[in-house]
Amino acid sequence: MGDTDLCPGTWDLRVDEHAIFGPPLREAAAEARAILLTLAAERLKLPESRLTVKDGMVSDKTNSRKRISYAELAQGKRIEKHLSAKPPLKKVSEFKVMGKPHRRTDSLEK
């Protein structure tokens, strides 16, 4: 995106990208998180209600040593699992990365 030689279009992506791409990406992320939570519950033999997610790790709320990473759950494979209902989206007030200012890692190069 953003390379008009490869992808014609002249709209200002800074204005439109969140409105166009944000909702579907948030829905996909919520579904992926819910599926990973389900897989973690199966692997850890715990109910989903006892699990918490932070920094790519799913852990037991009462015993933080009982945990598994997203990478361990996926095992480098494509996950073919679908939910019967759409999971709830995070509230904007709960965002930790999206919508927050971040320094560009390539800013010195630009």
Image (spheres, helix red, strand yellow):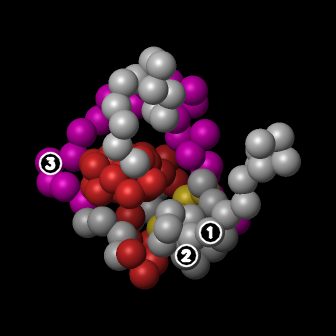
Q: Tag 1's secondary structure?
A: loop
Quadrant of the image for the C terminus? top right
Residue marked by disc 2: 61
Q: Is residue 38 above or below residue 11?
A: below
Instruction: Give the side of residue 79 with respect to residue 68, left or right.
Output: left
20 in the magenta segment: no
Q: CA distance from mark 1 to mark 2?
A: 30 Å
The quarter of the picture where residue 85 lies is: bottom left
Residue 84, disc: 3
Q: CA distance from mark 3 to mark 2?
A: 26 Å
69 in the magenta segment: yes
Foreground label between 1 and 2:
1
Specify few, some or many for label 3: CA neighbours under 10 Å numbering under 14, 14-19, or 20 or more: few
3 or 2: tag closer to the N-terminus: 2
Instruction: Give the side of residue 104 with respect to residue 4, left or right.
Output: right
Residue 101, disc: 1
Q: Amino acid at mark 1?
A: Pro
Q: Tag 3's secondary structure?
A: loop
